[in-house]
Image (spheres, helix red, strand yellow):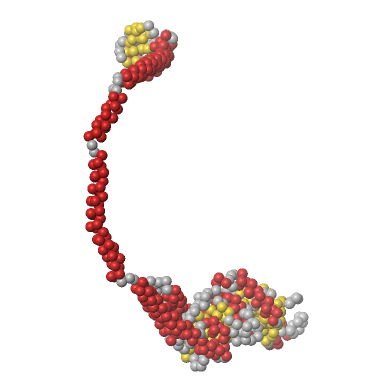
Amino acid sequence: MTDTPVQEMSFEQAMKELETVVDRLERGEVALEESITLYERGAQLKKRCEDELKRAEEKVAAITLDTDGNPTGTTPVEGA
Amino acid sequence: MSDLIDDPTPGQNMPEYTVSEISGEIKRTLEGSFGRVRVRGEVGRVFRARSGHLYFDVKDDRSVLACTTWKGQVASLSVVPEEGLEVVVTGRLTAFGGQSKYNLNVDEVAVAGQGALMALLEKRKKQLAAEGLFDPARKKPLPYLPRIIGVVTSPSGAVIRDILHRLHDRFPRKVLIWPVAVQGQSCAAEVARAIEGFNRLQPGGALPRPDLIIVARGGGSVEDLWGFNEEIVARAAAASDIPLISAVGHETDTTLIDFVSDRRAPTPTAAAELAVPVRLELMAWADGMGARLSRAATTGLAQRRQRIGDLSRALPRGEALLDGPRQRLDWIAERLPRALSGGVQRRRMTLSEVAGGLRPSALRGLLARRRDRLNAARLTLAPISREIARRRERITTLSGRLETAHRQRLDRMRRQLDATDRLLSSLGYEATLERGYAVVRAGEHVITRRDAAGREPHLEIQFADGRLAVTPTGAITPPVPPAPAPAAPRKRTKPSSPPDQGSLF
């Protein structure tokens, strides 16, 4: 169990830790006190993963370039 | 007046040019009669001047054609000439009057034939491999779930649509397209620029920095894909800090960028699949994890509850705990009075047994036995006198040993004293006096210098058999000392020992 706050974790980190938490709880080797802490952390991690999955947003933009080929901004792209 | 006189000079009718005029004429003729030409040959020496102009030779087995590409034209060459490359160059033939030379101003270079192209590609591959750019250790891992994906490709066409479709199906993400030409002369430069441009974006800047780059292009001929074989593209991809997936052409096409990219996707669609995981699967996974989590938690609690139940069933009733001891107490309490009376009874019996034997005759018998033993053990002086004799004998032995030890010790000390005395007399200065040396004294002081002797009013000379007082009779000149000469060395040798001895005494 790392000390990183759940909200600052990347999706992948949260995912890996959630797996570890569930594994430990299922093995049932942890003390009651700790298992409650673990459960709470697991719930947070799961929420973090789900939030990230829900946040899936689709935004496609193309970079506009000036005559020298330097980016100047974006224009939205339709389709996909 | 001279022009009136016929003075024929050979060639006078031919027009006369200045050098610059004729050079200009030649230049015009060359440019006019050839115009744009295509020339095939092998690239010879290549020289890029500091000014940016490119000078190179194109040759065959007999002739050499000097070629020039001006700085402004170099960028638009689709292939930069390299020595040994078989090319077709296109340009205008022109002359350079300053050196009486003609050359071809090349604005287009094409590689002649596919074999030559592949040979060039092999050469570049070897070079980049030698630099370690293909090293597997350089490859960066792709992010598991990139937030922003930068796509370097043509903004129109099937490739970007395929990628966007597949991303949409798997996991919709933010996509930033950097439009480039995917074939033709400017392709390589634009692709390289796009990769570098994405890397230059700052996180949180006006344009978001992607955390994954896909460089994609659909299938095509070797010439179409050639831009992705250019060194600048490969180097830009290798230098990219952002993980990069290359997806150029079909599965069978391998371009130089594929060797340096962090992952190579066989097709643009496959690149999208490498880029993101499937969202629905992840959601199912998250649900599954949630279910496992609560099941594990409830199972853990249920197991504990069960165990508490089991244990509490095994726990005996409180009253039952006291039953045994209480029964024991009853039993013992009942035995207590009986034990007391029984004990008194047993002791009374013992007393009567013992008292039975206690009679005056028994006492008398005991007295008689003691008296017999007293008579047997008579007190005598013999052991004491034996002890005294033994002790006396021991004293005699010890005193004999003491005497012997004392004598031996005295002898040893005397011998040591004699030896020291002998040593003393052999070292003492008195012995030396026997050999003719003498000690000169003034009062208590030993005189070792003639000067000191001269200053003294009275001197005393010590010989082996006694002392003689003398008075020095004035100064004696040092050069003629007939008698004192032998005396002086004597004195000199002598005094060196008396002070030493003096200090010893």
Q: Quadrant of residue B238?
A: bottom right
User: Viewer-proximal residue, B472 or A36?
Assistant: A36
User: Viewer-proximal residue, A43 or B140?
Assistant: A43
Name the residue: 60% across, 76% down.
B259
Name the residue: 52% across, 91% down.
A80
State the image coordinates of residue B137 (x, y, percent, origin top left): 55, 70
State the image coordinates of residue B496 (x, y, percent, origin top left): 39, 18
Name the residue: 26% across, 59% down.
B335
Q: Quadrant of residue B74?
A: bottom right
Name the residue: 44% across, 76% down.
A26
Is B361 situated left or right of B1 in this image?
left
State the image coordinates of residue B497 (x, y, percent, origin top left): 39, 17
Q: Quadrant of residue B202?
A: bottom left
Is B462 situated left or right of B132 in this image?
left
Can residue B460 be seen in this snapshot?
yes
Q: What is the quadrant of the N terminus of chain B in the image?
A: bottom right
User: Viewer-proximal residue, A34 or B235?
Assistant: A34
User: Viewer-proximal residue, B65 or B393?
Assistant: B393
